[in-house]
Amino acid sequence: QDKVTIFAAASLTNAITDIAAQYEKEQAVQIQTSFASSSTLAKQIEKGAPADIFISADTKWMSYLQDKTLLKADSRVNLLGNQLVLIAPKNKAFKVEMDKSFNIAGAFSGKLCTGELESVPVGIYAKQSLKNLNWWDTVKMRIVGTQDVRAALVFVERGECDAGIVYATDAKVSNKVEVLSAFPDTSHDLIVYPLALVKTASPAATGFYDYLKSEKAKAIFIKYGFTINLL
Amino acid sequence: MLDILRFTPSEISILALSLKVALFCVVLILVPAVVVAWVLARKSFFGKSLLDSLVHLPLVLPPVVPGFLLLLLLGNQGLIGKYLHNIFGISLAFTWMGAVVASAVMAFPLMVRSARLAISQVDKGLEIAAQSLGAHPLKVFFTITLPLSMPGIITGLILAFSRSLGEFGATITFVGNIENETRTLPLAIYSYTQIPDGDLPALRLVILSMALALGALMISDRLERKANQNIGRHHD
Amino acid sequence: MLDILRFTPSEISILALSLKVALFCVVLILVPAVVVAWVLARKSFFGKSLLDSLVHLPLVLPPVVPGFLLLLLLGNQGLIGKYLHNIFGISLAFTWMGAVVASAVMAFPLMVRSARLAISQVDKGLEIAAQSLGAHPLKVFFTITLPLSMPGIITGLILAFSRSLGEFGATITFVGNIENETRTLPLAIYSYTQIPDGDLPALRLVILSMALALGALMISDRLERKANQNIGRHHD
Amino acid sequence: MIEVQARLKRKNFELDASVQLSQRVTAIYGPSGAGKSTLLSIIAGITQPDSGRIVIDGECLFDSQARINKPIHQRKIGLVFQEGRLFPHLTVEHNLSYALNFTPVQNQQFQLKQIVALLELGPLLKQRPHQLSGGEKQRVALGRALLSSPRLLMLDEPLASLDDRLKNQILPFLKLVSTEINIPMIYISHSKKEIMQITDNLIDIQHGKVNCHL
Amino acid sequence: MIEVQARLKRKNFELDASVQLSQRVTAIYGPSGAGKSTLLSIIAGITQPDSGRIVIDGECLFDSQARINKPIHQRKIGLVFQEGRLFPHLTVEHNLSYALNFTPVQNQQFQLKQIVALLELGPLLKQRPHQLSGGEKQRVALGRALLSSPRLLMLDEPLASLDDRLKNQILPFLKLVSTEINIPMIYISHSKKEIMQITDNLIDIQHGKVNCHL
Ligand SMILES: Nc1ncnc2c1ncn2[C@@H]1O[C@H](COP(=O)(O)OP(=O)(O)OP(=O)(O)O)[C@@H](O)[C@H]1O
Ligand SMILES: Nc1ncnc2c1ncn2[C@@H]1O[C@H](COP(=O)(O)OP(=O)(O)OP(=O)(O)O)[C@@H](O)[C@H]1O
Ligand code: MOO
Ligand SMILES: [Mg+2]
Ligand SMILES: [Mg+2]
């Protein structure tokens, strides 16, 4: 039986697990998954990890591999998109306007949680948006960086942070937070999850690679809140 | 080549923060760990296994889990943290003191085990001799048991200090990654590993960590040698 | 309520994998750790501080760093791993054996420190007595030093085993998070923290980890008690 | 007045003691393994007998029926152990003065200087136990016990490694301790000659059996 | 024929020994702290003198000028330590037979049974050292040293805690060992009476000074 190994960013854990299970039912192929942060996965692939397919949570790490010509030529596509949203704990919602004139600092008390600003993708997008909205200077002292987007979500869910910036996919599945507003797509770089075949990918991998782009997979991605319009 | 050793003020301040957190960590756990170690080494009681495994728990779980539990308990909205915050005005979440607590929890089992090992090796005949001279058991503990288990306590301290210097998962989960407040060396190193060009700056911080650890080791080795000499045992 | 304790086959297989990795880990480090501990406890030589800090290094750094270094060294394209792979056909990267190596590196300092502490507490007078009976130093080591430091070695084993059970950062960095191969309990717990509604399944795995640790602790406590009795020291 | 009744069963050994001592100094005499050290450690509270009763000067220290068992440090019995048991981390001086830290001055029966002079420990004060010769250790142990100002002194072969000169110097002093300063003494030795120098009150213990009222 | 020249300086103590022993049995006699144990441990290779030379039966064990220093385990000197030093993790039986494991059968001068009977250790074989009385420990230490079939036996107050009956039983045996089985012996004791029973070759050591050719 053929085996296909996919390395995917941890935020895709549910969706990829579901899609793999469905694919295994249809095809006589075993899908092996490994979920970790995009950076870890990219470095592992660089060092010869037996990955066939890679989905990164940002473009940087995909480009990192592409620059080292470790990807199969022309296999890179922007598979998924996501939205950046401002959230608050369920009973602590406040009004916001995504506008430069809005006094964000006065709108909530306490901390604002998001991914670490320099290294974690969601934090990098968040910083761009905050700067674009001219909110950065007034809130930067109150920002708490986290290891990944899920950790930021937890802080808001627990009420430790009164506001947070996460992906729409994360906010959607939590019933303990409220989405206050989505950041305009123009306030930050496009959020994309690139997909590619690793150079050493087995022939069987192409089938699953194609399946990831199919309508069936799309349905599952949408179910978890991703956007597909970039495909 | 040696340019890599010219550290920036921001790197130095990360180092200073790490050092502060690690030092407070060992100070915080020293007394409780020795007490628990003594209890585990010398007493038998119902629930001892439970206490034992509770102490070891942080070692056994992925560090995120203790970090998450700390958040549940000691966060500003946490079960206990709520009162700390409202009544005493102490806030552990997102502060360096929280980082101290997180690494203390992770280092605690190491400290306890070392101290326990040393205490259980202390010759009871000497404790009995001290008692026969009229020393109250507490007096015996402080004048006989404790000094004689000093090498183990120092071992515990260096393990705890090292563990605290390296603590990542529980810290970032409990107090986040906030510059000048909770961004210790491991958190800063981790951040650099997350960006494509981060290898070099990460390496610089790794070197700083190593230097700190080396310094601590040298001090602890000297202390341990002295402690061993004090109790009539020699290194060489 | 007790439904939470009815574990699924997949959970059991994660448990079995973790147990396998942790057991191989302690078996792998036992001998080298005791040797290094003995050298550090009894010998003085140039470079001893360096060896000492090298041993402690994995403790001091965020686990991602040792994990990454392992990838550089022992990955299939790594400096050493290349030869392992090409000549012996051994592949550590992304296999459970790699997970063993990752947790061995992280657990090594704990094992060394405990054993070292115990060895340095062994009465040299007894070793001299054995030598005077004609025993070669190696014989002395195996018949006197080693049995008398057994409590410390057992302490080291339980610390190493626990650390291995809880190892996350180095493992995921070196061998990834692959089901049935490298997804040990901590990695599985991490995976659940990455998905909504993952709290309950994560909790179930946390309970499994605790059970495993409790079992190991109970065994080690019994062994330690026996070892202490063997050398004429009693727990109570 | 010391009254001891004790039974203790070990695998190869059974102790059955019933002694009543009204003399200042009593010597316990018996072959190796007879149970001399065991009897001492029962009186001191280190070993708990299976059953029995220990009363010193009317104060009950142990009574298996009444469930009385005073802890060692409250018994105020000075011990010189057969194996020395000096504190390895303390200098000779601090070993000697250990008990002085918590003995009220008015209860102190000896001065450090006095004991150091008597036992010729002056040059050794700064040394640690592992730097002492066998006889030196025994002298320090003896001094340490005396300085704890006990109401009863029990010595387990205290002079075994001492040469004749030191023996002859210390024995009279021990006698003095017991008569002048009023510390009763139980003295263990396998040397009849040594014992005779200090007292005529001999208790003979054989195979753990002793029944004697002096 | 044993030739020892050694100098050693410690803080409060200076050893300056020059002895030449051609007798089977030699006793070393001297007050507490005179340096008896120190001299023994220099001969055994445990303590290294500042300078000197040790030759036994023509074989040089130590020579500070020629930089010879044989390790302890190759000197084949049986030791009975003043403090016993029994292996706490081994039973009496295994303490006794420790050396038998690595002594070739043809070199074994005694049988375990023989030693056990002589020293009356039969009932204690399964016990551990911490379960022994003081005198029992000394007997085990003696038996252990004998069973290592040494070419020289050095005893540091081996009978200090033994009662007269056992002493009188073991002393003749030690004599026998030295004459019949041809093991030379150095015997330390502070008891002149004890020493006289075993040999007339006395070496007196005072304040670390000894100069004697027998
Ligand atoms: N902890 C113990 N466990 C079991 N048996 C013991 C223990 N301690 C001593 N014994 C045994 O009890 C008996 C009496 O021992 P004890 O130490 O009282 O003798 P002793 O009269 O002091 O002898 P010695 O003059 O040789 O010191 C001995 O047979 C000894 O083997
Ligand atoms: N390790 C050491 N360091 C420093 N001084 C020591 C050491 N060991 C012994 N001494 C000192 O050396 C001197 C000689 O000691 P040694 O043990 O040889 O005496 P000894 O003749 O055997 O006496 P005893 O009959 O009391 O056993 C003593 O004054 C002692 O204090
Ligand atoms: O790759 Mo992540 O889990 O979105 O930081
Ligand atoms: Mg005795
Ligand atoms: Mg001596």
Image (spheres, coloured by chain):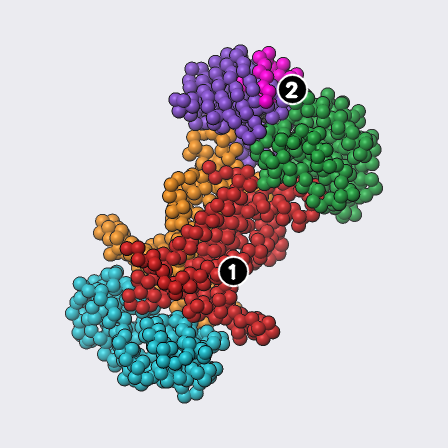
Chain colours: A cyan, B orange, C red, D purple, E green
Q: Is residue D55 above or below residue A178?
A: above
Give residue C132's position: percent from left, percent from top. 70, 41
Side of C5 where E15 appears, left or right: right
Q: Check disc 2 and give the amino acid type.
A: Ser
Name the quarter showing ligand 4.
top right
Q: Nearer the viewer, residue E123 or A114?
A: E123
Give residue A211's position: percent from left, percent from top. 35, 83
Residue name at image x 37 percent, y 43 percent = B47
| Residue topped by disc 1 | C24
**Residue neighbourhood size for the residue with mark 1, other residues' Cα within 10 Å, grouped as few (<14), some (14–19), many (≥20):** many
Look at the numbered disc 2 and give the secondary structure of its residue: loop
Q: Chain of mark 2?
A: D
On residue D191, the disc is: 2
Give residue A37's position: percent from left, percent from top. 38, 71
Side of C188 where E169 appears, left or right: right
- Real-space Cα separation, disc 2 to disc 1, in angstroms: 60 Å
Look at the numbered disc 1 and give the secondary structure of its residue: helix
Residue name at image x 61 percent, y 40 percent = E90
